[in-house]
Image (cartoon, grey):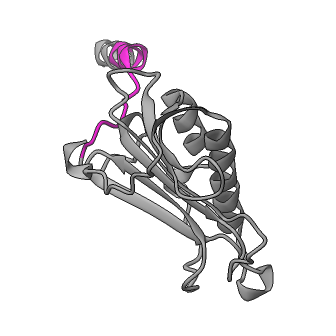
Amino acid sequence: MRRFAIFAWLMLVGAVLLAVPAVARCENGAPPSYDDIRAIKFEHWDCASPPATNRACLRYVMFVSNWERDQDQVAEYSQFNVGAVGHYELSVDAKALISILQRYDFFELSPPNVLVTDTPYSALTVKRCAVVTRIAMPAAILPATLKMSASYYATMGLLGTLDEFVREAHKRLLSPKPDEEDWDWDSI
């Protein structure tokens, strides 16, 4: 009996010492992992609804993909109005972009469904494995119109931080015409 107890104790200690943390890698039932992200699309349309004629309504789209091969990926960026209209390369640090998503717990966000039509909005679309997750929020909502939640404020914080990140990134003009191409999510 004593031999069995010693053997069991040694097996337990060995199992604890040899334990290696697992990382989710596109497995059924595995929790979402930020390491699995393969593409991010951020659409931002910033102005009041309806747009005032004297107010600038900035609208742009940013798309980043396949940075596993090159961590300092060059992204695509198109600005549709207000000043620097055109299609650009956008120099971004993909790790910094993913860290923003992590800081706001992107995969845990569940903002309220806001049924507001014909209004400017921000939308964040993330592809990890074969799963595409999208959050879209109108740009201007009066807090009285919704029962605000912590998730709503976290979502708006995430979208605002991404907007600041994109606006501060270095841009190199490729064409004076914006490109509103639908990026091929299946090839990513």
Q: Is residue 19 visible?
A: yes
Q: Is residue 129 left or right of residue 187?
A: right
Of the pair 2 and 60, the residue shown nearer to us: 60
Residue pictured at 40% horizontal, 33% vertical: 35
State which quarter of the image contains the N terminus.
top left
Q: Please tell me whether residue 19 is drawn above or below residue 167 in the rendered image.
A: above
Would you say residue 88 sits in the magenta stretch?
no
Residue at the extreme left of the image, as rendered: 187
Q: Residue 176, position in %: x, y?
A: 47, 45
Of the pair 180 and 113, the residue shown nearer to us: 180
Q: Is residue 109 left or right of residue 180?
A: right
Would you say residue 22 sits in the magenta stretch?
yes
Q: Please tell me whether residue 125 is drawn above or below residue 167 in the rendered image.
A: below
Q: Residue 18, position in %: x, y?
A: 36, 14
Q: Residue 71, position in %: x, y?
A: 43, 22
Magenta range is 10-27
Q: Toward which corner of the image does residue 19 lie, by quadrant?
A: top left
Residue at the extreme front of the image, as rendered: 176
State which quarter of the image contains the C terminus.
top left
Q: Residue 83, position in %: x, y?
A: 65, 51
Residue pictured at 52% horizontal, 67% vertical: 136
Q: Toward which corner of the image does residue 8 lie, by quadrant?
A: top left
Q: Is residue 103 visible?
A: no
Q: Please tell me whether residue 38 is drawn above or below residue 177 in the rendered image.
A: above
Residue pictured at 54% horizontal, 55% vertical: 60
Residue pictured at 69% horizontal, 53% vertical: 160
Total marks in image = 0
Q: Is residue 143 left or right of residue 10?
A: right
